[in-house]
Amino acid sequence: MTEKSTAFVKGGCGCLLVFFGLGLLAVLVGGRFRIGLGGLAFLFVLGGLGGLFFYALRRPAPQQAPPPEPRPWTCLACATDNDPGVKVCRNCREPY
């Protein structure tokens, strides 16, 4: 299963568990608790959508690539590769 489908199932099952917990609490204080098959499916889908919503919130943003390192430059006079921070050729002392 993918992460999205796992988030959907966890959200749907979590919503049903919360609903049954509240129903049990209602029964314990003297009330009644009933639900149909359509209501169960609706609660599962509603909880699944909530799970997808929270999955989208917690997913980290894509990382940007670090900037490229400066490349060495080649002297036009003697064809020597030089460090990027140096403005004078290390071989013939020609300026960059």
Image (spheres, rainbow, N blue to C red):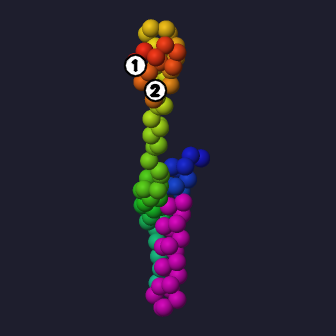
Residue at coordinates 48% horizontally, 79% vertically from top-left?
Answer: 22
Mark 2 residue type: Val
Residue at coordinates 40% horizontally, 18% vertically from top-left?
Answer: 95
Quadrant for the C terminus in the image: top left
Residue at coordinates 50% horizontally, 61% vertically from top-left?
Answer: 11
Mark 2 highlights which residue?
86
Residue at coordinates 45% horizontally, 29% vertically from top-left?
Answer: 85
Which contiguous range is marked in magenta?
10-31
Mark 1 residue type: Tyr
Residue 75's disc is none
Q: Is residue 68 left or right of residue 1?
A: left
* Residue 90 is one of the magenta-drawn residues: no
Residue 64: x percent and y percent?
Answer: 45, 40
Residue 96's disc is 1
Q: Main secondary structure of the magenta part?
A: helix
Residue 32: x percent and y percent?
Answer: 46, 84
Q: How would you rate the neighbour count of disc 1 (Cα within 10 Å): few for under 14, some for 14-19, many for 20 or more?
A: few
Mark 2 and mark 1 in contact? Answer it, CB < 8 Å: yes
Q: Secondary structure at mark 2?
A: loop
Q: Can you say whether 1 is above or below 33 in the image?
A: above
Residue 61: x percent and y percent?
Answer: 44, 47
Q: Is residue 45 visible?
A: no
**Along the line of sight, the residue nearer the viewer: 35 or 62:** 62
Alpha carbons under labels 2 and 1: distance apart? 8 Å
